[in-house]
Image (cartoon, rainbow, N blue to C red):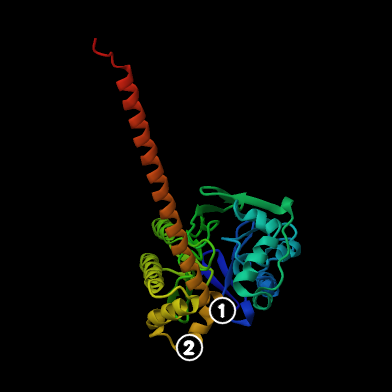
Amino acid sequence: MEPTFEAAPGVLGIDTRMTGRAVVTSAYLVAASEPVLIETGPTTSVDAVTLGLRSLGVGERDLAHIVVTHIHLDHAGGVGTLAARFPKATVWVHERGAPHLQDPSKLLASAGRVYGEQRLRGLFGPMDPVPADRLRSVADGDTIPLGDRTLEVLYTPGHASHHISLVESGSGALWTGDALGIHLPDVGVLRPATPPPDIDLDTAAESIERIRRRAQTVLMFSHYGPVREVDEMCELATARWRKWADIVREALDQTAELDRVTEILRRRTASEFDEATEPAAAMERYEVLSSMEMNAAGLVRYWEKREEREKREEREKREEREKREEREKREEREKREERPQAP
């Protein structure tokens, strides 16, 4: 694919060239009267995104808005640097993610624990903060005005607790972020992205169904490009999420070692690449975005949190039952004490 491409009427895609690879992560320009960039890629992609915008006629004082679907570094790592290069742009993000764009230190520390510091720097580079006066928080149902167009905000957690999707009024396009997973068009494989710390299968399925109901024309994947088979892609996404989660649940019955869980997940999902051209090379690009070890770790954490939640709920129910029984016993004693004694 070309460095820039038409994704929908009035919507242009930009290959961010993440890690120097083509067709891995895409940003998008909505050519409204107030132009908006959706997704930035990491800081290592800032030059490619800047060149892409310039080739589309957007200079440093032309960009009015930058919106990110969530704050993971492959989607928002470059937002602070791009905000400095495009000084008139307002930055929009879910309210839970906003503090981490203003001060990314905790975000970088968390990512460092997942990737390791050396790999983190190589993949994403540093992350500059966004000045508070340039930052706007959004929540479900909000509208981002673009002059002659708008973006409607849908809260779509599951991949991340601060994840949003976006519906553009002019084209009807819907940006999925990572809610459905990763779909590289030249490979044709949809793979879940389930990194720690806060993926959640149940909310992910709800978000995918919400996207399916709301989508009008085309899904815009951050990894990578437009997909017009809305129902089929959403059904496949839900099925894959559930399949992967079940595989990890079954693996945990055999072992608590992450390496072994990862290998079981890798082996039992390898057939998803059977129809890909050069499966090994294709799989390597998916691994760059969300490695199988990272996916396994996220799903292990999901099941651990779910077990903790179920135990806590059971304990609370038991405590409430015990309180109710004690209260009933006390009330019965009080009733007996109040009864008049026979002469």
Q: Tell me which residue sits at (62%, 70%) in the image.
A: 113
- 231 shown above or below 267: above
For label 1, the SS is helix
Q: Amino acid at mark 1?
A: Val
Q: Position of residue 334 (x, y in %)?
A: 35, 23
Q: Which residue is mark 2?
A: 280
Mark 1 Cα-neighbour bin, 10 Å: few <14, some 14–19, many ≥20: some
Q: Position of residue 4 (x, y in %)?
A: 59, 74
Mark 2 Cα-neighbour bin, 10 Å: few <14, some 14–19, many ≥20: few
Number of the label disc, if any, that sits on residue 288: 1
118 displayed left or right of 190: right
Q: Tell me which residue sits at (48%, 56%) in the image.
A: 156
Q: Is residue 117 visible?
A: yes
Q: On the rendered image, what quadrant is the C terminus found in?
A: top left
Residues marked 1 and 2 touching at CB (< 8 Å): no
Q: Is residue 55 visible?
A: no
For label 2, the SS is helix
Q: Amino acid at mark 2?
A: Ala
- 263 shown above or below 173: below
The one of 147 and 281 positioned closer to us in this rendering: 281
Q: Earlier in the sequence, mark 1 or mark 2?
A: 2
